[in-house]
Image: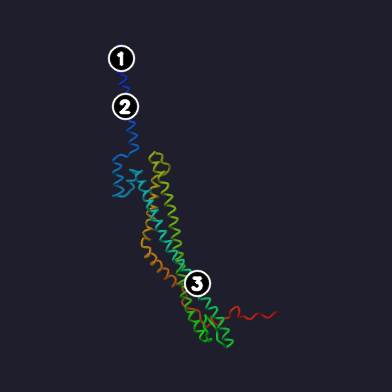
Amino acid sequence: MKMLSAAFDTAHRAVVLAWAVFLIIIGSWTVSRAVPPWGEKAQALFSHYVTGWTDSACQSNKVACLSAKYSDLDAVHTRLGTAIGALGNQKGKVERDLESRQRELAGNQALLDEGAKLYAQATRAKTTAIFAGREYTPDALKRQLEVLYQERPALQALVNQVAMMNDVLDRRLNDLMVKKTKVRAARDLLPTQIELVRANAVIGDIDATLRDVTKLADNVNSDIADLKDIGGWLATTAEIIKRKAQADRSGAMSDFDKWLNAPRPEQVAPKAAE
C-alpha cells in the first residue's frame, strides 16, 4: 500500500512539473511576441536618433520603422498645413492687389473713352469741354488724354504681372493641398500596417509601402524647404514674372493721334434707308 502511495505521489509531482514547464514556455513566447527584444529596441533607438531608417534597418525592425514613418508623415502633414496657410495669406493679398490694379486699368480706359468723345464734340463745335470736373480747350484736353494714353501700357503690364503671380500661387496652393491629402491618407494607413506586421499577417508588399512613404515625405519636405523663406520665394517668382511680362509687352504703342481721331460707334453716321 505504501509503495502504491509513493508511486502516485511521484506521478503527481511529474505532472505538476510538466505543466509548470509548459506554462513557462508559453509565457516566454507571449512576452517575446508582445515586447521586442532589447537588441531590437536598441537598434530602433540607434536608427531613429543616429543613422536614420536605412533599408537594412527597416528590414530588421519593420514595426519600429513603420512607427517612425508615421511620426515623420504626421510632422510633414503639420508643416504642410502651416505652409498652405502662409501661402493662402499671400494669395489673398495678391488677389486684392489684382482687383485694385484692374480697377485702375478700367478707370483709365473709362476716362480715355469719355475724353475721346468729348474731344470730338468740342472740336466739331469749336468749344470747351468739361472733363473729370475741369474745363478744357480741345488742345488742352488732347494733351491730358495723351498722358492717360501713355499710362495705359504700364497699367496693363502691372495687371498682367499680378494676374500671373495669382495664377502661380493658385497652382502652388492646389499642388500642396493635393500632397497634404496624400500625406494624410498614407499616414492614416500606417497603424493598420503596423498591426498586421505585429500579427505576421501582412497583405501586400510592406517594403514597397515603406519606399512609397519615404519618397512622399522626401518630396513634400523639398517643397516645404522651398517655401521656408516665403518672402524670398515670392520675390524671386515676382522677378521672373516681371521679366516675362516685359518680354510679352508690345515694343511700340499704337499712334495716339490715330487712336484719338478713329471713328467710334456713336460717331459713325447711319446708312440712309434704301
Q: CA distance from mark 2 to mark 1?
A: 23 Å
For the residue marked with disc 3, what is the amino acid? Arg
* Picture coordinates of residue 179, whole percent (x, y): 43, 55
Residue at 33%, 39% in the rendered image = 35
Circle 3 sits in a helix, a strand or a loop, which is it? helix
- Left or right of residue 230: residue 98: right
Residue 157 position within the rendered picture, expressed as x and y whole percent measured from the top left: 46, 73
The residue most toward the top is 1
The answer to which image quadrant residue 64 occupies is top left
Q: Earlier in the sequence, mark 2 or mark 3?
A: 2
Give the number of the disc on residue 15. none
| Displayed quadrant of residue 235 | bottom left
Please tell me how crowded label 1 is: few (under 14), some (14-19), or many (20+) other residues with Cα within 10 Å.
Answer: few
Q: Nearer the viewer, residue 3 or 186?
A: 3
What kind of colouring is applied to the model shown?
Answer: rainbow
Residue that numbered label 1 is attached to: 5
State which quarter of the image contains the N terminus: top left
Q: Reading the chain from its start, which is encountered first: label 2 or label 1?
A: 1
| Identity of the residue drawn at 36% across and 43% down | 63
* CA–CA distance in space, label 2 to label 3: 89 Å
- Judging depth in this view, the residue of 83 and 262 nearest the camera is 83
Q: Report which quarter residue 2 is drawn in.
A: top left
Is the Cβ of the residue at disc 2 closer than 8 Å to that at disc 1?
Answer: no
On residue 103, the disc is 3
Which residue type carries mark 1? Ser
Image quadrant where one finds the C terminus? bottom right
Residue found at the very far front of the displayed protein: 133
Three-letter amino acid code at the position of disc 2: Ala
Q: Of label 1 and label 3, which has the lower sequence position?
A: 1
Mark identifier at residue 20: 2
